């Protein structure tokens, strides 16, 4: 019988015990899946793909945009679904519908640090539920060649539009069916007050104003300065439309064929806002996206994507804007609460006066 070497047995037992006490090496976790952030917008929203991709890369996110009609329709969708939100962020409510959005309590307050850079004139919501992103002006655009060839002086006040020399020369949009049409209606109420704005529209109707149901028809069919070469040399459009005419001209042109009438009170300013929807499960990411929309990088992308102006003065305007953009010094603006209280009545009264 062989002798047992107890020293070896002892070492073996100790080795086994030590092995049992050795800590387990942690498993390296797999790459975290991107977090989805859904942004509800109006149909006119656009942004450069590489800009959105950079945000996604930096924040390990996947941004999904949910186009939901025009500004009013998109807001209705957000309000109707507020008990079970379909998105985390909402972009596109403007000052015409701002009070309705705030009274519906769909937004989560967020005081972005970038608000310190934004002029107070754009910060219409003191609770920071709706943060300003961009602005634009609804103005009368005119066909430069028509007025030059006819030797016709340009209108310098809305009241000029009822003069005989401008009879039948203006096409506007129906405010019941068109955002710029509604904005122009607001401009006339601001200029002529509650007491006399309907008198102005009566006179404008007598001066053969043309009414189109939507901006596309008014601009591309009726307006002589656009591709449609229609019969009216003046149209209610956007202050940035002449820039778009220059950018998209084919063949290229040295200057736009159109311009805007920007005398005091002739344009109506629209400001668009972004807000974080209550109920979001991605609050931190939503806040980062709001900061992103207010950042100079995003703000500099907007002008040639949506033809709006940035609210952040640190953003540089594209060269085409620097050359041809016309920004009115004294645009018309109405209090958003007053608009909310009277908007439907104004539209009804306009309809009875003009479409009768």
Image (tube, rainbow, N blue to C red):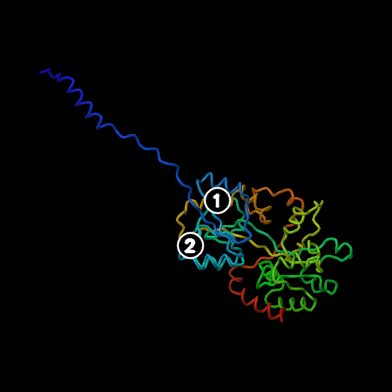
Can you give x and y, in whole percent of width and height, for residue 55 in the image? 55, 47
Quadrant in which residue 352 is drawn: bottom right
> Quadrant where the N terminus lies?
top left
Q: Earlier in the sequence, mark 2 or mark 1?
A: 2
Quadrant in which residue 222 is drawn: bottom right
Q: Residue at x 20, y 22 (%)?
A: 11
Can you give x and y, in whole percent of width and height, for residue 76 in the image? 55, 68
Q: Is residue 69 left or right of residue 150?
A: left
Q: Residue at x 45, y 56 (%)?
A: 281
Q: CA distance from mark 2 to mark 1?
A: 21 Å
Question: Mark 2 — residue?
Answer: 85
Outermost residue toward the left in this view? 1
Identify the element where label 2 is drawn.
Answer: loop
Question: Mark 1 — residue?
Answer: 291
Identify the element where label 1 is drawn.
Answer: helix
Residue 173 against residue 137 in the figure, above or below? below
Q: Nearer the viewer, residue 88 or 62?
A: 62
Can you give x and y, in whole percent of width and height, for residue 215 in the image? 70, 66
Q: Residue at x 65, y 50 (%)?
A: 301
Density class for disc 1 (Cα within 10 Å; few <14, some 14-19, many ≥20) is some
Quadrant in which residue 326 is drawn: bottom right
Mark in the foreground, 2 or 1:
2
> Quadrant where the C terminus lies?
bottom right
Q: Nearer the viewer, residue 227 or 152?
A: 227
Q: Is residue 175 left or right of residue 170?
A: left
């Amino acid at each position: 019988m062989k002798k047992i070497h107890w020293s070896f047995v002892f070492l073996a037992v100790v080795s086994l015990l030590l092995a049992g006490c050795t800590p387990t090496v942690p498993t390296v976790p797999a790459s975290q899946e991107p977090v989805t952030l859904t942004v509800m917008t109006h149909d006119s929203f656009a942004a450069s793909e590489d800009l959105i991709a950079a945000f996604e890369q930096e924040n390990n996110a996947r941004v999904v945009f949910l186009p939901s009609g025009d500004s009013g329709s998109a807001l209705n969708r957000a309000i109707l679904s507020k008990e079970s939100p379909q998105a985390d962020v909402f972009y596109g409510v403007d000052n015409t519908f701002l009070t309705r959005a705030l009274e519906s309590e769909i937004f989560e307050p967020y005081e972005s640090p970038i608000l310190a850079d934004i002029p107070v004139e754009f910060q219409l919501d003191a609770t920071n539920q709706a943060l300003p992103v961009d602005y634009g002006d609804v103005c009368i655009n005119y066909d430069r060649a028509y007025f030059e060839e006819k030797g016709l002086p340009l209108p310098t006040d809305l009241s000029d539009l009822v003069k005989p020399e401008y009879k039948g020369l203006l096409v506007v949009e129906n405010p019941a069916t068109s955002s710029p049409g509604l904005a122009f209606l607001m401009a006339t109420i601001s200029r002529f007050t509650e007491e006399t704005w309907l008198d102005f529209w009566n006179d404008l109707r007598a001066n053969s104003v043309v009414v189109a149901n939507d901006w596309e028809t008014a601009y591309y069919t009726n307006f002589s300065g656009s591709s449609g070469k229609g019969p009216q040399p003046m149209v209610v459009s956007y202050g940035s439309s002449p820039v778009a005419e220059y950018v998209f001209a084919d063949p290229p042109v040295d200057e736009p064929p159109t311009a805007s009438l920007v005398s005091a009170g002739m344009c109506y300013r629209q400001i668009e806002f972004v807000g974080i929807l209550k109920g979001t499960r991605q609050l931190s990411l939503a806040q980062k996206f709001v900061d992103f929309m207010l950042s100079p990088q995003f703000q500099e992308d907007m002008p040639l994507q949506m033809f709006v102006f940035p609210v952040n003065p640190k953003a540089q305007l594209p060269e085409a804007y620097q050359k041809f953009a016309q920004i009115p010094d004294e645009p018309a603006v109405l209090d958003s609460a007053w608009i909310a209280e009277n908007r439907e009545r104004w539209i009804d009264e306009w309809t009875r006066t003009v479409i009768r």
